[in-house]
Image (tube, grey):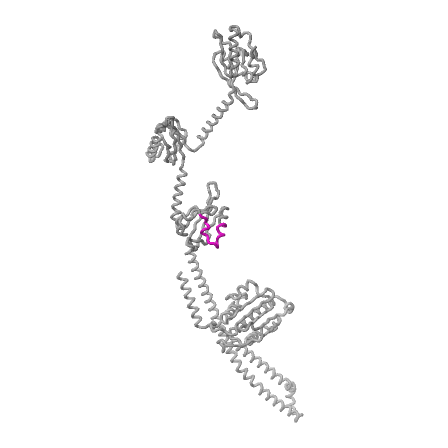
Amino acid sequence: MSDYTMSQNYFFNSDFQRDDLYCSFLENLPIAAAILDCEMKYLLTSQRWLSELGLEGQDIIGRSHLEVFRQFCEPLTQAYQYCLMAAVELCVEEQFQQADGLTGWRQWTLRPWCSSTRVVNGVMLVAEDVTDRKQAELALRHSEERYRFLITAISQIIWDTKAEGEFINEQPGWSAFTGQSFEELKGWGWLNAVHPDDQLHTAKVWSQAVTSRTLYKLEHRLRRHDGEYCHMSVRGVPILNPEGNIREWIGVHTDITEYKQAQEAMFCLAAIVESSDDAIISKTLDGVIVSWNRGAEALFGYQAQEVIGQPMAMLVPSDRINEEPQILKKLRQGERVDHFETVRQRKDGTLIDLSLTISPVKDSTGKIIGASKIARDISARKEAQEALRQKATDLETALLELKRTQTQLVQNEKMSSLGQLVAGVAHEINNPVNFIYANFKPANEYIQHLLGLLQLYQQHYPSPAPEIQGKSEEIDLEFLLEDLPKLLRSMEVGADRIKKIVLSLRNFSRMDEAEMKAVNIHEGIDSTLIILQNRLKTKHDHPGIEVIKDYGNLPLVECYAGQLNQVFMNIISNAIDALEEPHQSCRLQEIEQKTSEIRICTAMLGSDHVQIRIVDNGPGIPEFVQKRLCDPFFTTKPVGKGTGLGMSISYQIVTEKHGGSLRYHSIPGQGAEFVIEIPIRQSKCCLPMLGDKTVNKTISETTLMVLSDFSDQ
């Protein structure tokens, strides 16, 4: 008994031997096959049918196909009925779930089978798993769709032609760009869209490519649908048949208008860069030089091939090697460095002053990829600035010298007039004072003689006449005899005082000592103190100022005595002003609590200098005043009480006329100290006295020369 089963009505027109052969043939078919009757009931199946369809071990003979496969009824039923009715072969596909859970595809092939009388008795049904084929078809379809979308998405024009270059198919990309219809572009009509000036060259290159069967490549201008011409890069590839002849062409038009415009702009920029007198250099963020124009060659002495690829540091002097990393750091942060003045090194090793402008270079995404540098030679400007600065310095010095000279001349004139006045007054006072002072001794002797005679009269005539007695009582003779000697002594002291004051005035003015000579410094200080005695003594609104002298053992000092006395006068007067100033806002009780002092100390400084220190215990000098204390016309006193010339002139007298130094230091609230140091012996090269006509003439001539030079600039 075979592995297949047959229905009873199958054998009505066949013998057993033939049927066995058919059954054996069907059983061994390499496909899943079955024979069904007109009602879709199974008459015969192959073993592969049962195994592939998952029906092994089941008896399906006589059962309906629709009963066995309930999930796929309607499409197959319709196809089955049509196959029986029309006696034609049909194919139907269905999806099914495979054992691994994935979706598979199965194809049913229906073919009618007939009896010997040509009556359709049923259908031969073949089942075939077409999953692999369907997946390949789907992949191919997806690939075609992607290719179609890619062609549509790209900005290039894709075209194809016959072997001779004629369009025979519609070209959507070409038509969309040029606006030509298929009727306009077919054949060689596409050449009309090419710029008239480029048509001849285009046809020539095309003909050469067709003849040589090689790549067709050129650039031409193509008319856009709006009438504008765009630059195009054209590439065509020949497709050859097995015989090696061209079957067709496939080509691409790429719009390079922006590239052409950028190229033209780049050429213009390159021309500008090359024609610039300034050095224009490009470098990477690592400081490597990538471009070098003619201006850079002229400025630094290097040819482009010598520096491109080299580090920018080769131009930086060793003492400025830290500048380049700092500049690169700023560039990486996107900063621009404008008009940065520095020094760089030429090929021959010489240094050059430069003004640099450095800007970051960015790519299309905004990323900083390098830097451009414009270097300008400012050596000539630097030299001109330096010359101008020197001229300005010279002019300032000359103007200051003029101002100082004018100040000195004015002060000298004042001091000269004052000295003449003081000397004249002293002379006029001195004569009568000397006359009075010289007559005190004989006058005293005469009075003593008269008093002695009067005493003798009183002894020998104790009872004078009434008239004499009355007169004695009227004039209080006893008091006169007692007070008259005292009066004469007082007058003598006053005359002596006047004599000393006159001597101090003459000592201070030194009108008879215009030349430098050796003098006693202490005499000059004492003369100054006598003149200022009125300001030092006690008054009703403030106590006096105590002067403490701490004199050392000084030799005679060579100096301009009158001018040095002027220095003492200015410094001591300022000290008195400083001590009196707080008294104006304080009560008398508060003033009396603190003693005002001026200490004057002199001493030898080494073996060839003397030192005079003038110290007060006043409020001190503010810091902002200390910086300008010796400036001409600078004063902190109210208008009308100070000219601002005293300390300026004093400084010049000590430093310029005596080759010494005048220093001062002060702590606010703790007083001030002025220190004068001058040599005991003056050198022969010491400057002449202020007011000397030769000096004034020289200064004037120098100043005029500087002014003349400055005006020429």
Question: Which residue: 47% across, 54% down?
Answer: 318
Q: Main secondary structure of the magenta part?
A: helix
Q: Is residue 467 visible?
A: no
167, 92: nearer the viewer: 92
Question: Which residue: 56% across, 80% down?
Answer: 499
Residue 475: horizontal and vertical position, in percent?
A: 63, 86
Question: Which residue: 51% across, 23% down?
Answer: 132
Residue 312 included in the magenta stretch of the image: yes
Segment colored magenta: 310-326
In this image, 641 relative to 347: left or right? right
Residue 274: horizontal and vertical position, in percent?
A: 39, 47
Which part of the image, by quadrant, shows the C terminus?
A: bottom left
Residue 406 included in the magenta stretch of the image: no
| Image: 554 above or below 149 | below
| Image: 675 above or below 215 | below
| Image: 475 above or below 558 | below
Residue 598: horizontal and vertical position, in percent?
A: 59, 71
146, 100: nearer the viewer: 100
Q: Quadrant of residue 39?
A: top right
